[in-house]
Structure formats: structure tokens, C-alpha cells
Image (cartoon, rainbow, N blue to C red):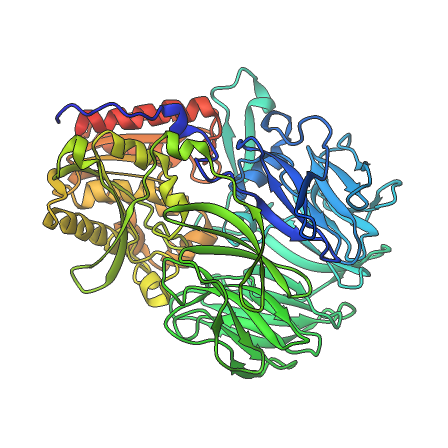
Amino acid sequence: MTTLSKSRMTLEAVATYPSPGMAAPSAFAFSPDDTLMTYLHSSEGSLRQQLYAFDPETGHHWQLVIPPGAGDQEETLSLEEKLRRERARSLALGVTNYAWAAQRTRLLLPLGGELYVQDGAAAPLRLLVSKENGPALDPQLSPDGAWVAYVQDAELYLVSTDGGTPRQLTTGARGTGRTHGLAEYIAQEEMDRKHGFWWSPDGQWLAFTEVDETAIPIYRIVHQGSDALGDAAQEDHHYPFAGQKNARVQLGIVSSVGGDPLWLNLGDAEYLARVTWFPDGSLVAQLENRAQTELRLVRFNPQAGQGTLLLTETSDVWINLHDMLWPLRDGRFIWASERTGFRHLYLYDVAGTLLRPLTQGEWLVDALEGVDEACGLVYFSATREHPTERHLYVVPLEGGEVRGITQESGTHQVTLDHACRRFVDLHCSLDQPPTATLRSLEDGAALTPVYTDLDPRIEALGLRPPGMVEFKSRDGATLYGALYVPSEERFGPGPYPTIVYVYGGPHAQMVVHHWRMAATMRAQYLRSLGFLVFVMDNRGSARRGLAFEGAIKHNLGDLEVADQVDGVRWLVAQCLTDPARVGVYGWSYGGTMALMCLARAPETFRAAVAGAPVTHWDGYDTHYTERYMGTPQSNPQGYAISNVMAHVAAIQGKLLLVHGLIDENVHFRHTARLINALIRARKPYELLLFPDERHSPRSLADRVYMEERICNFFAENL
């Protein structure tokens, strides 16, 4: 290809997190009396966060907690903590988590495997539990703030927030391959259930899981780049491969004063999806079948093991789990369902009988943000304005018109106060970095600014947001894309060498009215070199309804590739893309898509970078894979055609494979098996390995080197 111009950006700027403009405050919360707001933030714009407080009356900000040492650091975390952070895709350091007690001005801070509490804004930080007996995992305050429950060495413990000796609450798991009170791998990674125990509203009971993984064979990961030997250089995981056995999960209830647990009858459910305590003291479990086409809500009394069915959700596509079960004080509850093809809110009576839909239409509810029972109002975020935006709305609990609250175009992430009078609006758009404003819930009017800092890197690097486009696929589906077009002044009017940045899988949306698109630094860097970069959400992507998402069921990598090809054809028709110079890159599902584009559309894609790709679906986990593909036993033809290895013979373009050797999510085995297939087919490839990286590269040096290799690969081959 023609020689590309140098970029004004450095590769270090591309690889450094947070990206320009993305170091905004996060984890907003109101104190129990709503007098203070708290949040996590890095004043220096790095990954190292601290806990801050904001007084809305005075406009004063201050650091609320001075953590001992530097707080959480990668090198000081235990393996258990590192793996939990990996499940949450968390790169933050310092203070990374905190919680207010529901009924008391008391804060809980987990730091480096130890637990600290602080009694109000002016009190000192107190050490509650040290890590001398192992890290304290998943700590949770009781509603009254009097106790903290946590898991240590596979068992559930309680400790008074006044101090004292922790008390072991469960027994029998340690040393048996079981755990009490921890969410299993599948729950953390794929079900978005991070917890394995739950306090009752009165603090008298704890529901908890017993997870038995002994029937799942061990998958060993060896730290090939480590200087250590033996056990220190390897880790064993009970990984449930598609079509194979899952962990056995039981749900028990134990009194907070101790005693034998009551084990609840979960019937033939394969998955414990969610657990929710209701105000009347009953416990509701969401139970899912293995095919993920049925979800049952079952109510339990904490003194009886048998449950009563409240409702059953079924789907011809699949069940998308969510956190929109909201119990009301009078026994009724709000529930979200996709029964119409779009997720909407519904009101049920105490027995689980549907009373009325609260929302409806060809748009979907993203989150149930809060309920003002006194005024009969339900607040929620949704896509009603446009599938690429997110806004806050309100609807009467007794039924009525939906009213919008947020006005500015873009994405609004909101946090309501307890009284449902105000909310924090973390807002951004394609051309506006995140800002935080305290607003009135009545009409969305601004009350006071919370965060308005402008990252100087945005101007220094000359970041320009991409342009949004809309077009039709070959069979008439509406698709949305984003274009990072090179400077016409520097590179001419086009057509340009083009690189498609793809994810393409379900439960994700790439093209959004959000500043993160402007802060997608690899795309910005490639644009500055003269490449046109194109991002598009093919069918199968999230937030467009079940028909759009479910079009790929039982056949992955076919329709998605066709849609991406249609995107390139549209670019060519606009005279933006040189059809002889088109590449593609992606990570995880996007890595799989990059390979599928190269293999199933070699006439369109000439080069691909595939990061941490799933190359054979029988090698990925049960809950994710079987949701979309069924099991290998029930859908052998779908598995055969959806595996990258089935299409290796058709690969004609250049290929760079990237993988971390200790990736415990998409094992390096995926890339190794693909390499065997490439060798058998005598297909050339390049390989970039990171011996000490998991699924998300964390080392800055590794990321800089990776960006350099990827950019050089495209410069050489397009």
C-alpha cells in the first residue's frame, strides 16, 4: 500500500487507560439520609481511584477515605481477587469498591483482601478483618450496618462492625471442592450474578449458595512465562465446557445467629439466576432451565423448604437475564419481560397474577432505576428515543403515559436518591465527554454541577468523534454504523484503505451515542495513519429487540458476517473504501468474527487481527454457548458450521493471532487448535502471545507492544 503518514499520537497514548475523557467519576451513591453523594474517581486521570464525597448544599468535594498504602494493586491481590476482577472486567486500582449500609451512616471498604469500615464522613477508617487467614471475599453489610458477612476459605463468616472476632456461619465446604457463599464461575462470567449470599431485609437471615464443582474435570493453566515452578506456576479451574456438566448449586437459608441451614427445593432447575428478598421476609429465586428458554420465579418462606411458583417466563429465542424484579411494600412487584419481543415493565399482584403492562412499544427498557411508592411513580432507563441512546423516563405505577426526564441527546447513566427527588446524571454523547450533574427528578432541571472537568488530552491529541451512519442490509434490516474517516486535507477524498472493527456478538452494542466511541483510541490512531475505520452492529447485537438479536440462533458467524460484508459494500458504494484493501480486527467474540470474515468472505476481507478468539464452540462454557447454540449433542450441525476450523481452507488473506497464555475465559487452547488446522491446510499466519496476560491485557507494556504490532500488521498488508 502507499506509505502512511505518521500520527501525532503515540502508541503509549493509545494503550493508556482510562482513554481521554473517560476518567469520569463512577459508582455514585447517596448516603442513607441523602445529605451526601459519594463516588470513585481518579483526580490524576489514571486507573488509581479514591473515594470522594460531595455536599450538594455547599458544592464541596473532598476525599472521604484515606486508604492504607495504595489500596488495591495488581501485585498485592490474591488469585481469587484477581479472578473476580477479571470476571467484572475491572482494571481500576486503589479504592475499587465501597458500600453504604442501608439504614445507617456507615461505610464498608474492601481493600487488598481486608475489610474496613468508617462511621460517617468524619470518622477514621477502622480495620475490621485482616487477610492473615486469606482474603475476605464479596463482603456485604447487613441492612442495619451492624454486621458484615463475607467468604473466607470457602465458608461464610460474620463479624460485628463494632469489631471483635469473626464468627464462622457455615461449615462442611472447606477442603471438599465445594464453596459456601460464592457465585460460581458461570454465574460471575455469564449470568451477571456476582454474589453467592444475600441478607434478609431485617438482617435475621442469610440466603447462600453451596457450589459443588467436583463433577467438573479440572482444566489446568500453566504460567509458561513465570520463573516459578510447581504449584506456583499453575492454576486449576473447574471449567464447564458446552454440553458437559455444570456446577451443582444449592440454595440454603441460615439464621444470622447460627445453626443448621435450611436447604430449599429448587426442583430440576439447571441454573440459579437471581435471588431477591421481599419486604415481607419471603425469598424469591429465579430458576432457569439448561436450554435457557424457561425462567421460573419461585417464592420461599425462610422456615420452609418448599416454594410457590409466582410466574414462568418462556421464550422461543432465549431468556435474557436482568435485574428488574422490584418488590413493593404491599406485596405487589414489578417485573421485566421480553414477551412482546422488546423488554418492558409489568405490574403483578402478590400471587404473581399480571395486573397491567407499565411500558410498551418497539423499544426496550435498559434498567429499572427506582420506584417512588408514595407518589406511585416508576423510573426507568430505555431506548425510546433511539436504539443508540439511553434516557431516563417515568411512568405511573397505576398505568399511564411514559414521560421523558433527560433531554440532551446521548447516553444518561443515572443514580436516584432514596427519596426519589433528585438524581445524578452522568451524561455524554459522541461529541461531549462525560459530565455529572445533580438534577431534579420532577423535570430533569439541573440543580448543581458535580463533575465538569475537561481532559486536556482530547485537544492535545486532536480527537474527532466518528460519524454515525444508517443503511439497509441486503435483506432490508436497518443497521447502524460509525465512521472514523481520515482527514481529507491530509489523505485526499478517498477511497481509503479500510479496517472494520468488529465485536458482532449478542449481549453487546458497539455503535452508541457515547463518548467512548470518540475515545476508541486504536480506531483514532489508525484513522490518523490514513485508514478509514468502520464499526457496525450486525444482527445478533443487543438493544434492538429479540428478533434482531435472535436471528443468529443455532448458527453463529453466518448472518453476522453477511451483515459486515454489506457494510463494506455500502462503504464502497459511497466511494469511501478501496475494495482491494479491507481488513478487520476484533477481540473475544470479535476475534471469532475477524476469523470468520477472513474465512467466509475472503473476497471482501484481505487481512485480519483476531484477539482471544473462540475457534470451536465446544471449547467454550455452557451458559453462554448453549444460550445461542444449544448443546453439541442437540445441535451438532450448528456447532460444525459455526466453528472457525470448518472454514480454514477458504482463508486467503493475511492473519495475525493474538492471545494471552493464562486466559481462563477463552483458553489459549482455542488458538492452538486453530493453529493445528492452519498447519494442516498450509495456511500462513502470524502469532503474538502474551505469557502473563488473561482475557483482558492489563500490563501497559504489553498493550503498547500489542498496538504497535497490530498497526504495523495493517500498514504492511493493506
Q: Tell me the residue at 74%/56% (across/down).
A: 32
Residue 423 vs 314, above or below: the answer is: above
- Residue 413, how many percent across, how many down? 51, 55
> Is 611 situated left or right of 248 in this image?
left
Residue furthest out toward the top:
227
Q: Quadrant of residue 81?
A: top right
> Is 428 situated left or right of 595 in this image?
right
Name the quadrant of the N terminus: top left
Inspect this view and state whether residue 115 appears: yes
Name the foreground residue: 31 vs 562: 31
- Residue 231, how many percent across, how many down? 60, 24
Q: Quadrant of residue 398?
A: bottom right
- Residue 80, how many percent across, how many down? 62, 36
Q: Tell me the residue at 68%/62% (across/down).
A: 418
Name the foreground residue: 341 vs 172: 341
Q: Quadrant of residue 125?
A: top right
Query: Total number of numbered labels?
Result: 0
Residue 66 vs 398, above or below: the answer is: above
> Is 150 situated left or right of 290 in this image?
right
Name the foreground residue: 685 vs 493: 493
Residue 180 vs 676, above or below: the answer is: below
- Residue 503, how many percent across, how many down? 34, 46
> Is 549 situated left or right of 249 in this image?
left
Inspect this view and state whether residue 243 appears: no
Name the quadrant of the C terminus: top left
